[in-house]
Image: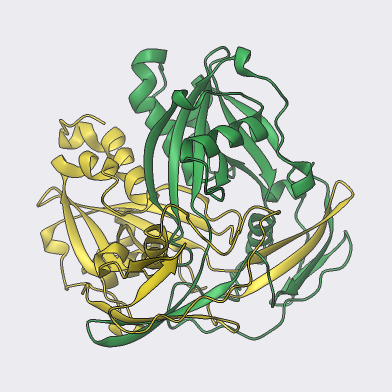
Chain colours: A green, B yellow
Amino acid sequence: MEQINDIQVVPCTNSNYLKPFRVHYSQNGTKKSWDFMRTHDSVSVLIFNTTSHCFILVKQFRPAVYMCEWERTKAPEPAMQAGVEEEGAAIPETPISEIPQQEAVATAGGVKTPQPPGSAGMTYELCAGLVDKADLSLEEIARQEVLEECGYDVPVAKLRRITSYSSSVGVTGAKQTMFYAEVSDENRVGEGGGAPQEGELIEVVKVPLHEAMTFAYDESVPKTMGVIFSFIWFHNNMSPKYKISTNV
Amino acid sequence: MEQINDIQVVPCTNSNYLKPFRVHYSQNGTKKSWDFMRTHDSVSVLIFNTTSHCFILVKQFRPAVYMCEWERTKAPEPAMQAGVEEEGAAIPETPISEIPQQEAVATAGGVKTPQPPGSAGMTYELCAGLVDKADLSLEEIARQEVLEECGYDVPVAKLRRITSYSSSVGVTGAKQTMFYAEVSDENRVGEGGGAPQEGELIEVVKVPLHEAMTFAYDESVPKTMGVIFSFIWFHNNMSPKYKISTNV
């Protein structure tokens, strides 16, 4: 899963997935503009297996995370090329080099940086999906994702809403809604792993309850804030039920 | 601050802030592509004022959040036009209508939807900023943002690192590092409010400690996950010191 090679980066002028728009508006009489992207809202699900007392996460290769990691190894200078949120950020027009073959290197400040291992782009995340089916409720979409990515068949009625919030407020502003689902080994009806026909290659990962808080705050484990927040939410809200002894 | 009008949305083919790239790669021998955007890493700061026992947040108009809210009022169908994370998502090529004047309406499914009030795009966030100065440490950048946005002069040594995580893993994969800073009224040296010359118009907001957990989980208050997570982190880690009586 972590064999990543033949990396080539090219500017992308006509993406089907990333479509920038510009909104002109007036705020208290002052004319402004902002570039943003439209995307779907999303759902995420904290899954707790009551048989094994483990959290069920997904782990997958994230090209964007990988490219950021590579860029970061070109330290001391984080030579990013696009400023998103800061109005005054200047964007150098230097095209990104094409990076051929497995033994690719990137250069920054005259220092060649070897391609990092594929593990540098592997990210631990909550099971999640886009809200892109108009006829389904958020709970139904969450249920489908749990089944597709993690192989558990959870009744909609067992999904508990944790909360919702705005994500990527500078770029997409999409709303994310987080759920909690308790499952048991009896609910396991498949392997999960995502939809290979859509390019998904997802590893289902178990994090034992007693290791969860250490996992949450271990910065050497690449993860989303959703993982950290939801583990702590569980600690605060479910610990009487499951007798967690770890401290936050 | 919340007077938003003269809204006009246009496709944006040459954004200085949003520059899509495409990475071609091979994962375990299977060729894949992914569209992503490069951006800077960022820092955020949970600020607690020990004089007034309040959290200090920033509130600002977020065009992307506003546009999402508007889109959502066109229910029952969330007719989004761009799928970001799902490989199979088809993007209709329909251009977004230009929306003239204050009394703008949008149409979806034949139903006209009036423009929502500016408050629909106002978002509560942690004080935050981009890591775009190569000669400054994360702590120094965080310190500058606290001063610029909130008007508090905090010594770098008083910034406590909470944790870090990957953000927008499907799009940017940037790393965010979160800090905690205790300030007092004596550290207040300015009004904050951001850099008007960069188009920033930021309201500094106080959330009393005893209202924080209610605020965190009130879904009618638009906010980022960073606010929710950091309030709960404070609750778990600082409550002995500040005698919080609220339950999570």
Q: Position of residue A220 (x, y in %)?
A: 58, 43
- Whether residue B194 is situated above or below residue A171 in the rendered picture: below
Query: Foreground residue, B238 or B202?
Result: B202
Q: Quadrant of residue B63?
A: bottom left
Can residue B232 be spotted in the picture? yes
Q: Position of residue A216 (x, y in %)?
A: 49, 36
Q: Position of residue A101 (x, y in %)?
A: 89, 63
Q: Residue at 38%, 35% (x, y): give it.
A: A162
Q: Residue at 22%, 72% (x, y): give it.
A: B2
Can residue A111 be spotted in the picture? no
Quadrant where the N terminus of chain A is found in the figure: top right
Q: Residue at 21%, 69% (x, y): give it.
A: B151
Query: Foreground residue, B192 or B182?
Result: B192
> Is B53 displayed left or right of A72 in the figure?
left
Query: Foreground residue, B144 or A81?
Result: A81
> Is A23 displayed left or right of B34 in the figure?
left
